[in-house]
Amino acid sequence: MSLVLDARQRAMLEEMGVKVWLPTARHAPVAAPEEPAADVPVDDAPAPVAAPEVRPAAAPVAASPRPVAPAARPVPTDPMGAAGGSDLRIAAPQALYAGEGRAAVGGWLVVADMPPGADGRHGAPLDGDAGRLLDQMLRALQLHTGTAPVHLVRAHRAVAGAPTAEDDADFDSAFAAWAMPLAPRIVLAMGPLSAQRLLGRQEPLGRLRGQACPLPALDPATRVVATYHPAYLLRNGADKARAWADLCLAAAHFERSAG
């Protein structure tokens, strides 16, 4: 008679120091495996392998956006936005209508915003549609009759790398030197660059026009009248009436100073 012990019974006997000799596997009946008790260690039962704990992947943390510094605003450098006016240039005067005798001085000086051409040269002042409109405006005041001289100087902002016209000069140093020998009684500033520089103010051209202001750099009686540039009037015909009112204002001060 053979002693049939299950795995639990064998484990209990081994814990008590009792050696149990079992028949070989070919004579021993095969018993259905029994689940070992949780509190009794079983040598010949493979220890359950715990499945690795699967943790959900951490959601990616969005990186905090780096603070973007506000774009630096260009520092205004002159009344028109350029530093100290060092980039504003003026060309030598050109006669539009010559006066007779002593009338070669004491006339009109037109300071207009007109950059030179792509080759760095200043073309004829009355070329193109804007030049023809300027001629019509001055003729409407009868300035082409020659009773008083009319000279034109061109103002423009210098462009880095662009060719420089031979007769260009710094605006502040050249204007008085060129204007004083002409002794104009009226200065017509056409365009924002010329108007803002001559008046020393930063308001838009619409606020500078419609008034006759003294020009301390010249004779105290000399007045500056700001108005729109002919090229602007070609694009904004509704302002032609305001420009004509400015011309009439300048003509009135010119006649007053002559008397």
Image (cartoon, helix red, strand yellow):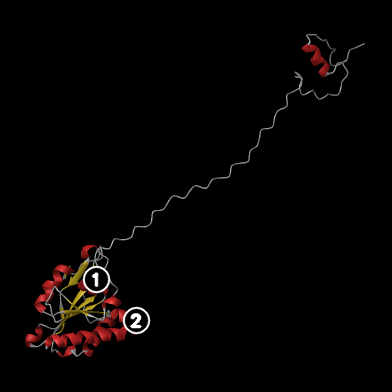
Q: Is residue 45 above or below residue 206?
A: above
Closest to the observer, 14 or 161: 14
Residue at 6% of width from left, 86% of height from top? Answer: 102
Q: Which residue is mark 1?
A: 201
- Which residue type does callout 2 highlight? Asn
Verify CB contact (< 8 Å) between mark 1 and mark 2: no
Count of numbered circles on the image: 2
Label 1 or label 2, whichever comes before in sequence order: 1
In this rendering, the answer to whether 14 lies above or below 119 is above
In the image, residue 203 sits, relative to residue 34, either above or below, namely below
* Quarter containing the N terminus: top right
Report x, y in % for residue 132: 25, 84
Residue 71 vertical placement versus 223 (above, below): above
Q: For residue 170, say whether it is visible.
A: no
Residue drawn 24% across the image and 71% down it:
201
Mark 2 lies on residue:
236
Looking at this view, name the residue that lies furthest to the top: 18
Q: What is the crowding at mark 2: few (fewer than 14 residues within 10 Å), some, or many (at least 20)?
A: few
Residue 238: x and y in percent read: 35, 84
